[in-house]
Each structure stands twice: as C-alpha cells, then as structure tokens.
Amino acid sequence: MNIHEYQAKALLKGFGAPVSNGVAIFTPAEAESAARELGGPLWVVKSQIHAGGRGKGKFKEESAGEKGGVRLAKSIEEVKAFAGQMLGSTLVTVQTGPAGKQVNRLYIEDGSDIEKEFYLSILVDRATSRIAFVVSTEGGMDIEEVAHSAPEKIKTFSVDPATGIMPHHGLTIAKALGLSGALAKEAYDVASKLYAAFVAKDMAMLEVNPLIVTKDGHLKVLDAKVSFDSNSLYRHPDVVALRDETEEDQKEIEASKFDLAYIALDGTIGCMVNGAGLAMATLDIIQLYGESPANFLDVGGGASEEKVTAAFKIITSDPKVKGILVNIFGGIMKCDVIARGVIAAVKAVGLQVPLVVRLEGTNVELGKQIIRESGLNVIPADDLDDAAQKIVKAVKEAV
C-alpha cells in the first residue's frame, strides 16, 4: 500500500525525523489559509499523487500552466493561483504513463534553502533477508538513471536484524555522502529514526529523494515516498486509515475485497489462474505467442465458487480484455469449483470475448463435464501450451 508525501512526512515526523512544516489542502481557498499559516516568504506547492517525477511532470490541461507538479511560490497570491491551476488537473509523469493522474490534493510546504541534495532509501533486500540502505550523492535524480550512468556513486549496505542500526552504519552513510563533523553525527541520527519508522510500521520501501543539507548546516527530509507490506496492514489500522482509493485501480480494490491477488497490466488477454508460479508462467507463455496479458490474477488454492465468480467479473470489467484464459491445476483447488464459478460469472455478466479453459488435476473430468453441459461457447485446451496458442489465435482472429 502506498501513501501520499504529506502522510509519509507526518508519520516520519512522529519518529523524530526532520521535515519541513506543511499543510495538506483540497481547495484554492485552503491553499491561501495554509500559506498564511506557514508564513513564508517562500512556499512549495506540491501535487499529491502516487507517482514519482512530479517536478518534471506536465499537466494535460493548458489552464494548469507550463510548470510541473511541484512549484515554488513567492507570494500568497501565487500559492493560491498555483492551487487553482493544479487541483483537478491531470498530471503526467514518467511513472503515471500517458493517462496521467488527476491531482485532488496539494501539499503546501515551507521553502528550504538547499546547500546539497542526496538520495537515501531503505528497503527489504530479499537476497540477504535484511533491511538495506541505498545512498547516493546524486540526490534529486532518478536513482535508476544514476545506477545506469554512474553506479559507482551508489552505496548499498544491509543491517543485521539482531543488532539493528548501529553507529558504524551512520559512518558508512556519512562517508558515502562526504559528510563530516556534526553532519556525520546527524546522518546517524536521521538514519536511525528512519530505520525505526521502517521497522515499526512494516514498510516495504522508504525513499527520501532528496535528503538535503540546508544552508544552516542540517539534514532534512525534503521528500518522502513510503509503501507498506500489505500482508502486515492488519497490525496497523492507523496506516490503513491513510489509504487513498482514488489513487488505486478500481479492479484491484474490488479484488482485495475477495482476497484475490490481482494486478492490472496493459495487455489484451485476461488471465485467471491458481498459484502465483503458474500465473507467472501463464503470463510468460502468452507473451511468447505474441500477445500481452491484461492482468495477473491468482485465485489461490482454496477459492470458493463466489470467489471465482468475483474474479471473472473483475477480468471482464476491463475494457482492454479481448480474450480470457482460465488455467487451473487442481490440487487443493477443485476443477469443478472453478467450472461452476466460471459458468455463474458468464451467466451474470455475459461473454463478449473468446474464452479458453484449461483444467487439470482434482475433479478435472467433472469440471470439464460441467463446462460441456453448460452450453457456453468455451474453447477447451489440453495443456498450457495448447491453451496459450488457442487464446492468442482467438484474439487475433477477433480483431
């Protein structure tokens, strides 16, 4: 689960991390009030969407002006004007895709005098099964670009969970960023507070880009992007309360209600599979035969007929879907349950695109019989390779 920058900063501030004062607003009138509350003389007006690259992004609407999604205002009137232009407009960044995202809220923040900009992030390193820090002197830039053009400027290290973060980790960060004296000590202090927040809130990633040195010689978290491990959210109702469903794909929201592992993709073939590994293999083989999957969907090992029906409805609600592939290997999941779920869903929403069904495993003959006797126009498949070729052919012939 992701949250907005202003929410991330409020959370980090609760752990003592140094952040600027700011106010989240939803209307131009609130922007003016926020600017007066903060006092100025400089304000930063920041679009709040779940995507990076906001500063370099562009709005689709001409009325939003030519400046990006992060703007420096030098007067209260300018703050209000920027808010009027940005709220309700669609911001397109390198991470939103061409469709962009509508800006429904802004963060008005005190301006900062910047001496230097750094990059710092914390994430779970699955290779070492530890929490890892990634730091770089190239703050304010896309870390992917730095990794490509100047990988030597990125320093990565992991933290032993038995000890947690220690002073020598702070020294590693200070050395990597070229900090000394009081700033070196401050690096450990800031890193400790960020690490504490990461662990306490079960974060999956915490990215600070940039982490700055101010003109008066202190470190400050100038931007913050935070995502959480969705499997741990039951422990953090305060985090769940920060969820902004307008920033999420509605199909993924609906899937979460039925405990379905669903991720929307950009292709044309909807997939319903049981088991993450089989689902990934299904996506790969569709790509191999010349089409692209419209989603990743794992119904799980013990899905009910209701769950299967919900999954099918979610797939068919995607207007990009030109064909559907159901690929089930029945172990705990029984093929007859899948068959009944598919039939119930088709009767409820109709079938406007080709449907290929491959069933194997527990109760497979019963599942196939149920589908045969349903009268539905379903294309049967013997194995995964056969299923992939048939759905790709059906989609191409339907175009």
Image (cartoon, grey):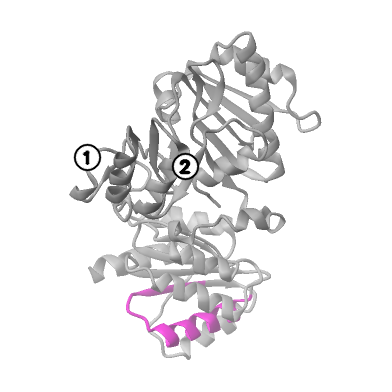
| Label 2 neighbour load within 10 Å: few <14, some 14-19, many 20+ | few
- Nearer to us: label 2 or label 1: 2
Q: Residue furthest right?
A: 162
Asked whether, in this view, residue 85 is left or right of residue 301, the answer is left
Asked which quadrant contains residue 69, the reply is top left
Q: Position of residue 306 (x, y in %)?
A: 58, 80
Say which of 129 and 145 sits in front: 145
Residue 75: x and y in percent read 32, 35
Residue 225 x, y percent position in the rendering = 51, 40
Q: Which of the pair 395/251 is nearer the observer?
A: 251
Indicate the position of residue 74 as horizontal and vertical percent values.
32, 32
Look at 63% across and 44% down and name the residue there: 203
Q: Is residue 299 above or below residue 220?
A: below
Q: Which residues are magenta?
A: 334-358
Tell me what residue is drawn at x 35 percent, y 58 percent: 267
**In this image, 302 relative to 306: left or right?**
right
Residue ID for mark 2: 37
Q: Amino acid at mark 2?
A: Glu
Work out whether residue 250 can be spotted. yes
Which mark is on residue 66?
A: 1
Q: Nearer the viewer, residue 288 or 246?
A: 246
